[in-house]
């Protein structure tokens, strides 16, 4: 009888060890999945649905020692990017383009401006007709058409674009260093097509008509 009792106790202990092993393995799996999930690369991207028409001369670089250097009629879009992941994520191929021809359209970056303006703030007159109490806002243009969204960061870019007068549509897009399994950029002009991209197409067929009579600007975009 004692032999059977001893064997039963051994079996009970073995079962408890087996259950404990299974529970520990399950906990380890859950923890590893949770860690992988928290470390995954992800971005929250918001590109403005509408464009702001910017009248010639109302967007300009300025300092205390020189006359403002302004730009021609343009369109302004804003993009906001939240990177909640613990890793930096690179972006590249930031571009404005005509979606009909897929030809690039000029837009403003620090690198595309004159050297003497690269460290100056870019201002835009919010109420340009109010000469007594002019209101200005600073535009945060990107340094170049590529860069990095820092880990756990918020980035806001103001994209000042110079489309042609006869343009009817305008595209804007950029890619990030995350492989796309299915969807690829239909407007990609490089071999980098299999990366996740964000973009939007705007109808700008009447953007020039919404402007008052154009004023000459002191400097064109470069």
Image (spheres, rainbow, N blue to C red):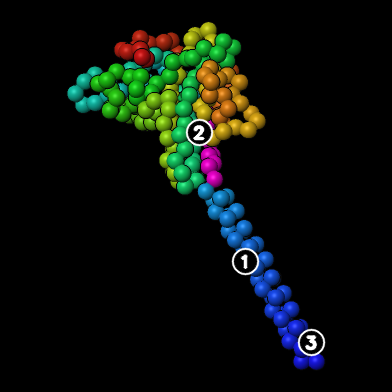
Q: Secondary structure at mark 2?
A: strand
Residue 173 location in percent, x, y? 53, 25
Residue 115 image-quadrant placement? top left
Q: Main secondary structure of the magenta part?
A: loop
Q: Can you identify the residue that label 1 sits on?
A: 24
Residue 133 location in percent, x, y? 33, 29
Q: Secondary structure at mark 1?
A: helix
Q: Can you identify the residue that label 3 sits on?
A: 4
Q: Nearer the viewer, residue 84 or 7?
A: 7
Residue at 21% over, 26% down: 64
Of the residues tagged 3 and 2, which is closer to the observer? 3
Residue 147 location in percent, x, y? 41, 31
Residue at 74% over, 78% down: 11
* Quadrant, the N terminus: bottom right
As drawn, is 106 to the left or to the right of 60? right
Residue 185 visible from this viewpoint: yes
Residue 35's disc is: none
How many neighbours does mark 3 have within 10 angstroms: few (below 14), some (14-19), or many (20 or more)? few
Q: Secondary structure at mark 3?
A: helix
Of the residues tagged 1 and 2, which is closer to the observer? 1
Residue at 36% over, 14% down: 222
Q: Can you identify the residue that label 2 sits on?
A: 177
As drawn, is 196 to the left or to the right of 117? right
- Asked if residue 24 is among those painted magenta in the image, a careful observer would answer no
Residue range corresponding to the magenta coloring = 40-50
Comes first in the chain, label 1 or label 2: 1
């Amino acid at each position: 009888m004692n032999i059977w009792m001893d064997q039963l106790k051994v079996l009970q202990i073995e079962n408890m060890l087996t259950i404990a092993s299974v529970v520990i393995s399950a906990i380890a799996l859950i923890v590893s999945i949770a860690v992988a999930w928290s470390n995954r690369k992800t971005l929250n991207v918001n590109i403005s649905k509408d464009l702001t028409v910017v009248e010639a001369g109302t967007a300009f670089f300025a300092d205390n020692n020189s006359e403002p250097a302004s730009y021609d009629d343009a369109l302004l879009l804003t993009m906001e990017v939240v990177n909640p992941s613990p890793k930096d994520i690179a972006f590249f191929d930031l571009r404005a383009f005509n979606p009909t021809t897929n030809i690039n359209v000029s837009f403003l970056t620090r690198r595309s401006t004159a050297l003497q303006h690269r460290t100056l703030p870019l201002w835009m007159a919010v109420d340009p007709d109010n000469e007594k109490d002019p209101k200005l806002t600073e535009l945060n243009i990107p340094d170049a058409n590529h860069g990095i969204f820092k880990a756990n960061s918020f980035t806001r870019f103001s994209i000042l674009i110079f489309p042609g007068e006869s343009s009817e549509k305008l595209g804007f897009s950029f890619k990030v260093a995350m492989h796309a399994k299915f969807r690829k950029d239909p407007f990609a002009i490089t071999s980098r097509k299999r990366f996740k991209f964000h973009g939007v197409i705007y109808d700008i067929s009447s953007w020039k008509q919404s402007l008052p009579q154009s004023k000459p600007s002191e400097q064109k975009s470069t």
